[in-house]
Image (cartoon, rainbow, N blue to C red):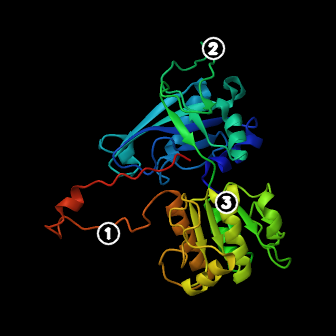
Amino acid sequence: MSNRLKALLATWLPEKDSCQWVLASIIETQRSSYRKTGAIMLINSQGKSYGLLSGGCLEADLKRQAQKCWYNNTDITICYDMQDDNDIAWQLGIGCGGLVKVLLQPINSENDYLDLLTLKSQLDNRNACFYHIDTVNARSTPQSPVQIKNQVLSKPNNSLDLVIAIKPAPALVIFGGGLDAQPLVKIANTLGWYICLVDSRTAYARAAYFKEADTVINEGYASLEQNLLLPKADAIVVMHHNVSLDAHALKLVKSQANLACASYLGLLGPQHRTELVLDKAQLSSTDFPNKLSNKLANPIGLDLGGDLPESIALAILSQAHAAIEQASGKSLGFFHSELNSSNNTDNINSIKKIVNHAN
């Protein structure tokens, strides 16, 4: 199952009243940590958890701590300090060298399910929003009334203590439903992306071939400009293996508002073929919207090697992922031991700050 928040909430909703639940949120980190502030997971009284706050080393202890929330019906904060060798984090074998502070909150009807129903609705409708996690006010206890604190906001509020920007999963639109599109759909599904597959040919783009796709559209391109099923795309891949159909898809990308907002556009095939496609579409490589950071990725994908459809799909999605996250797509580096290199002081002492999206 995907670790994206939408998938976690989809699992939680039908079971929300059948057992006890806790929302676990990272509210502070220092130095190195597997995930950053705003990461969320769900824990229930049946011993199951959904999502990750670490590489798996904190989760068992968090399940144990969650029992205190259910017993006392109150929030608790747990601090794992990998900088302190007396802290429980060392016993758990984390060794990242940082600090992680986690807030555990019971989820029930008395606290309006921490407004997670609203949050799920927003994500289901692919709306961006903000989620306020209250870390300041007095917590509820058995002796004091339960107060509703967490809430979904339509815009950020700087006066609140912790507000997490929540974005819907990236939307991938694939033009072309051939066999090599299948691994692309499968990997994108593993990433938790929303997937729309389009092909005008009746023998292609069949839902039975692409069970992981959220939407499959099998109709002529002339009617697609007004099609309400086309999502607001983050990434677009054109892979018909047909010059004319590729040209139709590129023309549609330029004119259709939901497609023109994409951060990534890639066309399968060598550059001499792409010149034929652009000529057929009466377009140039600079005719696409400014938001497309690479204008037109061609040849498509990162240079990962391999010629199997699965390898090509991985290369394509790696490049698209980097474009969406505004990352370089370059290697993060290779380890150089201080013991083995006296000239590597600058690399060892420098710390690269990597900011992860909350969900």
Label 2: few (<14), some or many (≥20) within 10 Å? Answer: few
Query: How packed is label 1: few (under 14 Cα within 10 Å), some, or many (20 or more)?
Result: few
The amino acid at mark 1 is Phe
The image shows residue 314 at horizontal and vertical percentages of: 56, 73
Q: Residue at x 55, y 40 (%)?
A: 165
Identify which residue, 71 or 310, lies in the foreground. 310
Q: Which mark is residue 259?
A: 3
Please tell me whether mark 1 sits on a helix, a strand or a loop: loop
Q: Is residue 242 left or right of residue 29?
A: right
Determine whether the residue tagged by mark 3 lies in a helix, strand or loop. helix
Question: Do residues under tags 2 and 3 come within 8 Å of each other at their CB atoms?
Answer: no
Q: Secondary structure at mark 2?
A: loop
Q: Earlier in the sequence, mark 2 or mark 3?
A: 2
Question: In the picture shown, does residue 241 fall above or below 60?
Answer: below
User: What amino acid is at disc 2?
Assistant: Pro
Q: Amino acid at mark 3?
A: Leu
Q: Are marks 1 and 3 in contact (CB under 8 Å)?
A: no
Point out the frontmost of discs 1 and 3: 3
Contact (CB < 8 A) between labels 1 and 2?
Answer: no
Q: Residue at x 73, y 73 (%)?
A: 248
Neighbour tally class for label 3: few under 14, some 14-19, many 20 plus, Cα within 10 Å = many
Using the image, determine if residue 210 lies above or below residue 145: below
Asked whether residue 116 is in view, the answer is yes
- Place residue 192 in its image quadrant: bottom right
- Lateral position of residue 285 relative to residue 206, left or right: left
Number of numbered discs visible in the structure rendering: 3
The circle on residue 145 is 2
The residue carrying mark 1 is 334
At x 68%, y 80%, the residue is 280
Horizontal and vertical percent for residue 218? 83, 69
